Image (cartoon, rainbow, N blue to C red):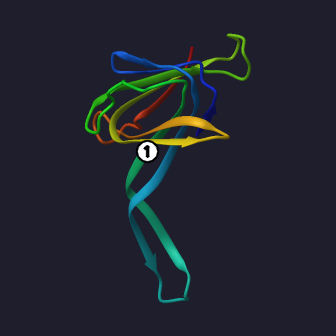
Amino acid sequence: MLVLNPRQVEFGAGTWTNVTSVSVGRSARHVLTEWSDSGAHVVFVDVPEQVVSVRVVQEMLGDDMDLVRPGESGSLSFVTGPNSSDAGTREVTIECVVKTVSYETSVSRGSRRFIELIAVSEDGEADPVDVDDA
C-alpha cells in the first residue's frame, strides 16, 4: 500500500504534518515450502508468519524537536482519497511500534524524516491494517 501526500498523520497523541508518503509493506518472516517426488518444482507454499512494516516520509521545514523514539507505540491513522475533495475518502488505522527514526538532508530535496514502524495485530490473527470509508 502506498499513499502519496496524506493530509496529516496522527500517531498516539501527536500529529505529523508535511507528510509526503506512507507506505505499508508486507514480508514473510517464515516460509514453508514442500516438493513432491514427481518433479523439481514446489507444490505447496505457506506463509504462517509475516511482518507488516510502515514507513512515513515527512518533509522537515525547520529544526525537528519532536521526540519520536524507537519502542514508542500507538495508533497511526490518516485519511486518504482519490483527490482533494472529501468524496471517496478512506481512513487507515494501524497499531504500531516505532522501529527507527532517521533523517536525510540534501540541497535539492531539503530535509526529510523517515519513521519506520512495525504493525501489531491485536490477537495475532487479525490484519493490523484497518481501512474504512471515512
Q: How far across and down, in percent of the image, does residue 40 sit?
A: 55, 88
Q: Is residue 28 left or right of residue 83?
A: left
Residue situated furthest front in the rendering: 107
Q: Is residue 76 left or right of residue 21?
A: left
Label 1 Cα crowd, 10 Å radius (few <14 / some 14-19 / many 20+):
some
Residue 56, visible in the rendered structure? no
Instruction: Please determine whether, in this image, residue 6 is positioned above or below residue 119.
Output: above
Tell me the amino acid under the disc marked 1: Ser
Instruction: Please determine whether, in this image, residue 105 is positioned above or below residue 72.
Output: below
Instruction: Please determine whether, in this image, residue 32 is positioned above or below residue 116.
Output: below
Taking the spot 63% from the left edge, 40% from the top edge, the residue there is 107
Taking the spot 28% from the left edge, 30% from the top edge, the residue there is 73
Q: How far across and down, in percent of the image, does residue 3 sit?
A: 61, 33
Residue 17, visible in the rendered structure? yes
Examine the image and state in which quarter residue 120 appears: top left
Instruction: Compare residues 59 and 115 and report the one nearer the observer.
Output: 59
The N terminus is located in which quarter? top right
Examine the image and state in which quarter residue 18 appears: top right
Q: Secondary structure at mark 1?
A: strand
Instruction: Compare residues 100 and 48 and report the one nearer the observer.
Output: 100
Instruction: Compare residues 65 and 35 and report the one nearer the observer.
Output: 65
Instruction: Compare residues 22 and 69 and report the one nearer the observer.
Output: 69
Q: Which residue is mark 1?
A: 53
Taking the spot 72% from the left edge, 15% from the top edge, the residue there is 84
Examine the image and state in which quarter residue 14 appears: top left
The C terminus is located in which quarter? top right
Q: How far across and down, in percent of the image, does residue 98 sit?
A: 33, 37
